[in-house]
Amino acid sequence: MKLHVRGENIEVTAALRDYVEKKLGRLDRYFDNGEVKDVNVTLRVLRGDGIIEVTIPMSGVLIRAEETHPDMYAAIDLVIEKLERQIRKYKTKINRKLRHDATTKVAMRQAESVSVLTDEEVDQEEISIVRTKRFAFKPMDPEEAVMQMDLLGHNFFVFQNSETNEVNVVYRRNDGKYGLIEPK
């Protein structure tokens, strides 16, 4: 596992880099050899708070966690705990899925976050799109899409339904349950 550590508004000292490497090294026990090649770590300081963002691209899935804390070292500890929970959850769901349906090959896709306009931006006279993302869809069933959405920490997820070959959206409802949007 190769770490790519970079800093924004902060100098990444040798001690900070060593601490990140030591803590992320704990995650090796969750991965098979070669399952994870690169890990991207971004450290930044904003209004006196340390923010750490870790992205782990795996075979077809993207695990991402972000934490904010006034102490950068505490933020690193918090993000490692969050990543461990996500990885355990992912591995458990995959194993359960494989046991449940041994003939189905689990296909996950990497996704990037999508910008969402706030109410203030909508109230403006002119709406301007500030970011455009493009990515390929890999077919998956709605349960896998919900799992991917949870791993990314998003409120919705766009995917190609493997049963219908149509573009669908899963989303988290206010009551904590999930919804599926299908085209007519």
Image: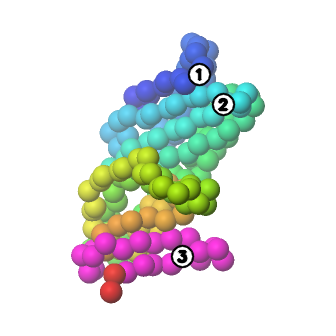
Q: Quadrant of the C terminus?
A: bottom left
Q: Report, in whole angstroms, how far the alpha carbon at label 3 lies from the one at label 2.
A: 33 Å
- Magenta stretch: includes residue 181: yes
Q: Position of residue 170 (x, y in %)?
A: 45, 72
Q: On the image, numbered disc 1 is attached to which residue?
A: 9
Asked if labels 2 and 3 touch by Cβ distance under 8 angstroms, the answer is no
Query: Which of 139 and 31 lies nearest the eye of the viewer?
Result: 139
Q: Secondary structure at mark 3?
A: strand
Q: Position of residue 36 (x, y in %)?
A: 38, 40
Q: On the image, numbered disc 3 is attached to which residue?
A: 178
Amino acid type, residue under disc 1 in the picture: Asn
Q: Report, in whole angstroms, how far the alpha carbon at label 2 lies from the one at label 1.
A: 8 Å
Q: On the image, numbered disc 2 is attached to which residue?
A: 46
Q: Position of residue 55 (x, y in %)?
A: 47, 41
Tag of residue 49 = none
Asked if labels 1 and 2 touch by Cβ distance under 8 angstroms, the answer is yes
Amino acid type, residue under disc 3 in the picture: Tyr
Residue 22 in sight from this viewpoint: no
Q: Quadrant of the N terminus?
A: top left
Q: Position of residue 76 (x, y in %)?
A: 64, 33
Quarter location, residue 44: top right
**1 or 3: tag closer to the N-terminus:** 1
Amino acid type, residue under disc 2 in the picture: Leu
Magenta region: 162-182
**2 or 1: tag closer to the N-terminus:** 1
Quarter location, residue 123: bottom right
Q: Report, in whole angstroms, how far the alpha carbon at label 1 lies from the one at label 3.
A: 38 Å
Vertical arrangement, residue 47 with respect to residue 35, above or below: above
Q: Residue at x 43, y 27 (%)?
A: 4
Q: Residue at x 68, y 38 (%)?
A: 68
